[in-house]
Amino acid sequence: TSAFDVATLLLQDDGKLLVGGTFGSIGGVTVNNLARLSTTGALDAGFPSGAGTGTNAVVRSLTVQPGDGKIIVGGDFTAYAGTTVARLVRLSPSGILDASFNPGTGATGTVYAINRQEDEKLMLWGFFTNFGGTANQSLLSRVLKDGGPDPTFTNYTTSGFVVAFSAPSALLTLANGEILAGGTSLASGVFDRDGLLRYVAATLPNITTPPAPQAVLAG
């Protein structure tokens, strides 16, 4: 069992389970905030464990790339396995830092949710004022496959539409390109809603309160 808090879980196609959060051990073995369990529930011997592995702070979000099985990890950490990073990393399927993924200065605050689009770009949602030095990607950012901010994406937080929230929780990209961002105490300066924001391409966000949020977004 984990010594502290589990913040995120991700089941891989092979049945193994990625676990992220704030913890220092699982089953008596040292792991630092990130681990993988086998189908039996035991620590996966093929994933790093022991002193000097994992992150130096909480892991909040996980996703796996199809095809190559690489793992995207987000949270509030500034180091992975002793290497300085900026709250977002990509790992090989065996948990080794992927140097070809370079977010530069990365996120200035916690990455709470990651969603992979069909074009392999990543959507990030969290408490950051910019990503990769790009100010128009605060709170919500789109990231290219190489880790850099997508220069074609603007989330309007710097053009008069300011989103505030006390607890971001979930993110989903729809097939039509719209983005659903879920959390608690969402406010825009124009409208106030608890629950869900819907971002529509080339327009200001539309704000929606779903009748049953758990049926729209999980996590």
Image: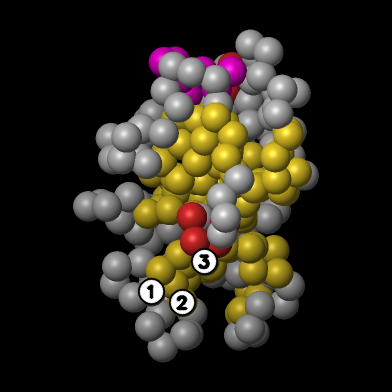
Amino acid at the residue labelled 1 = Lys
Most common secondary structure along the magenta stretch? loop
Q: Position of residue 54 (x, y in %)?
A: 58, 58
Q: Residue placed farthest to the bottom in the image?
A: 40
Amino acid at the residue labelled 3 = Leu
Classify mark 1: residues with Cα within 10 Å, few (<14), some (14-19) or many (20+).
some
Q: Position of residue 185 (x, y in %)?
A: 75, 43
Q: Which residue is located at x 47 percent, y 24 percent?
A: 149
Q: Which residue is mark 3?
A: 9
Q: Which residue is located at x 70 percent, y 29 percent?
A: 191
For residue 16, the mark is 1
- Considering only vertical position in the picture, is 161 above or below 175? above
**Separation of marks 3 and 2 at Cα, in angstroms:** 11 Å
Q: Which residue is mark 2?
A: 37
Q: Earlier in the sequence, mark 1 or mark 3?
A: 3
Is 128 a magenta residue?
Answer: no
**Separation of marks 1 and 3 at Cα, in angstroms:** 11 Å
Amino acid at the residue labelled 2 = Leu
- Element under disc 2: strand
Q: Is residue 201 visible?
A: yes
Q: Quadrant of residue 38?
A: bottom left
Q: Which residues are magenta?
A: 148-156
**Separation of marks 2 and 1 at Cα, in angstroms:** 6 Å
Disc nearest the viewer among 3 and 2: 3
